[in-house]
Amino acid sequence: MTTVTRTRDRTPDTTGRKRLVVVGGGMAARRLIDALRARDERDEWAVTLLCEETRAPYDRVALTSYFTGRDPDALALGDQGVWDDPLVTIRRGVAATAVDRHAQTVTTSAGTTLGYDALVLATGSYAAVPPVPGKDLRGAFVYRTIDDVADLRTYVETLRRETDRPLRGAVVGGGLLGLEAAGALQALAVESTVVEFAPRLMPLQVDEGGGEALRRLIEGLGVTVRTSTATAKISGTRGRVARMVFAEGPALPIDVVIFAVGVRPRDELARDCGLPVGERGGVIVDDACATSDPNIWAIGEVANIGGRCLGLVAPAYTMAEIVADRLLGGEGTFPGADLSTKLKLLGVDVASFGDAFATEPGALEVVISDPVGGVYKKLVMSDDARTLRGGILVGDASAYAALRPMVGRPLGGDPAAYLLPEGAAAAPMGDLPDDAAVCSCNNVTAGTIRCAVADKGCTDVAGVKACTLAGTSCGSCVPLVKKLVTTELEKAGVTVSNALCEHFDLSRAELFDVVRVQGLTTFSAIIDRHGRGRGCDICKPVVASILASLDLGHVLAGEQATLQDTNDHVLANLQKDGSYSVVPRIPGGEVTPEGLIAIGQVAQDFGLYTKITGGQRIDLFGARIEQLPAIWSRLINAGFESGHAYGKALRTVKSCVGSTWCRYGVQDSVGLAIALELRYRGLRSPHKIKLGVSGCARECAEARGKDVGVIATDHGWNVYVGGNGGFTPRHAVLLAEDLDTDTLVRTIDRYLMYYVRTADRLQRTAVWQADHEGGLDAIRAVIMDDALGICADLDAAMAVHVDSYEDEWAAVLSDPDTLRRFGSFVNAPDAVDPSLAYVAERGQPRPATPAERQDAGILIAGTTLEVRR
């Protein structure tokens, strides 16, 4: 069922109308009111909502976003004009204290008595707190309401002023709510540890493989994770939280603790008035959400339906729709719960849907695990490998929107293809059946969305969302909604919007120009003036890239740090075992013997694995996070700087030895490569950029496989653009030939800056060229012939970049606040991560395999061990 808002005249006269009292001011209650008022054509019902909190219903799913904006009003659900409806009365800060079923009245905390013809219990749940000693100390919190998070923030800020030192926090519980709470501590700059009794994080949503991948990703963001750990007590000093004591192992010093071990239904009203409740709580209801009393319903987390209470928003909304239908004489029944979830926890995508644990007979599992890329994907198929039954996605959940509606349906191809990059994203939207559920929160099908576009005149995602409610709750279906809308509009011959996301109507290129012209320097300012809402995992990294491309501050400075992707958070590439790689810049591949010795000495002193890269650099693997500052201090003192291997930026300029040494060389390729790399170093862009310079037509530097390739001729330089290796290799295309060096550099300046300004997010130069109106010919006219009259502006922008360059790691080393990010353990920043263990192979360390760990016995963390055979 879906609801739409309709406009009509209201009469303030409630006389003679049936009285509905809704107890509880949560998300389910708000959906019930919206659904009822949208369908109650004859204005049969007058509604009174009792909100125990002093606020109208708000979005609890987005509670953590309070820490990025502090404005609780931004979390308010839906159109606030509903509270001006004369047939809707909201009583804020008023709780129901008793229900008299015989008299059909509700007594409130304000001392009033309300009569009802129908009563809906939507009291939700409360945060469970384990019975551990010390749970009532100051500094112990739960994570459930805006007041909870506001109190947490106030406590942390006050304690920071009093102590003037880094604060340490812990979260008891490693499920959905626990990781959200850890994100809150991160947002407050509190070092955090997640303590989970189960053997893995999110045990109800992901399997062992997914849990291990999630753990690596979470730990890579600076959060310590302790699984299979029981909290025995919280001890304090002067009435405040001071340390967490475990059933086994040493205590953990902490300043704040958040309990996030689950919720319990608030069913006390039902118990007190004699309504049946479940063995583990919750008001027992039938498939119409009706209790044993024909005048009382229960919805949301307090409802025990089918023998269980459901803690997700989608089934709560479905229950609200059913009760609204029943109140108006309908026969709606609960179709069963869709327990699919997709979240971004601490910046990490996690999704689970269908029979995720392959419990059905004959289930087959298709798994792709990429520890290096930080990705774990699993599809559960029927025994003939044709019908999708469920899945788990960790690290990259981009396929979720396309896969979840296909549960119970044939995929129509190799299941593994859907797990590869762009596999599910490339699935044709015409193949999605009309009855496939796209938005489980609001029960919206693909056919409903197609109808909104074809029959109701919706021309963009925002219009479809307003018409159908698809994507208005958790938002995980928005990418699929956008694809369906785009497909339907294209079928109708309508020009499709190129809006960046639902928060910005501008494209990336338009947003870049707005930020550049108006001089905006923060995400908050940008979204306040040109967007709406709180942003998402699409627009935040895009804005981070734009700000960095315009050289508007260090990527880890202030608010910008919260926008960065995983590797940029620590200016290093996360590896499969949780360690990091270090890549100093070696311009043009040229390095002195002293430089080689310095790199070798660093590698030796820190026990790092060394390898020459394809970009003519030296990669040092196995660095622990707390070692990164010390390693970079040594390298910078030796004359090196960041190679930006972790960022969407210039990576390398590869070169052959050219005319200096080679008897075939006709130009100095090394000298030009060094000059280009020093010129474009640190240039942030929509995707990574690689250059190559070959000293003759023999092309030893493989320049035509690069975004910009330069090949020497007898008369100067030929420049090629739009090449790349990777998943879809492209050969670079000739842009101009026989250029002198100054003209060559100016041409590359303009090409790169034009690309940075106009490409879409995560778009390589090859795709940008192909998508650009008029293709490479049009680009050539812009940068060679000044067809748009912007060449002087492009030249000036590149000059600003060159003049303002600052090595990112050198800046980090000079900033004590930023340096606090780099520690394996919040309570022991210099301690070695015991999960890191290595074996010697070919004279170098490499991560030990599980079998080698077992064979070696007790491993000493962070050291190189010989495997005992």
Image (tube, rainbow, N blue to C red):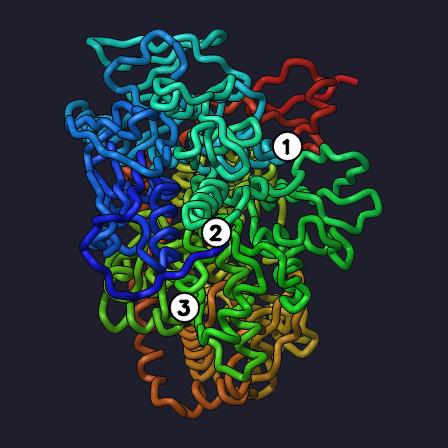
Figure check: 659 above or below 714: above
Query: What is the number of callouts on the image?
Result: 3
Other residues around mark 3 within 10 Å, as few (<14) / some (14–19) / many (≥20):
some
Furthest toward the right, the residue is 384
Separation (CA) of disc 3 from disc 2: 16 Å
- Residue 822 placement: quadrant: top left
Q: Position of residue 339 (x, y in %)?
A: 56, 39
Q: Position of residue 582 (x, y in %)?
A: 51, 43
Q: Please tell me which residue is depicted at 68% across the width and 75% down the height of the picture.
A: 664
Q: Which labelled disc corresponds to residue 806?
A: none
Other residues around mark 1 within 10 Å, as few (<14) / some (14–19) / many (≥20):
some
Amino acid on which the number 1 mark rests in the picture? Asp
Separation (CA) of disc 1 from disc 3: 38 Å
Q: Which residue is mark 3?
A: 463
Is label 2 in a helix, a strand or a loop? loop
Q: Please tell me which residue is depicted at 34% across the width and 31% down the height of the picture.
A: 144
Furthest toward the front, the residue is 16
Q: Nearer the viewer, mark 1 or mark 3?
A: 3
Amino acid on which the number 2 mark rests in the picture? Asn
Q: Which residue is mark 1?
A: 207
Asked if one can make out residue 317 in the rendered structure from this viewpoint, the answer is no
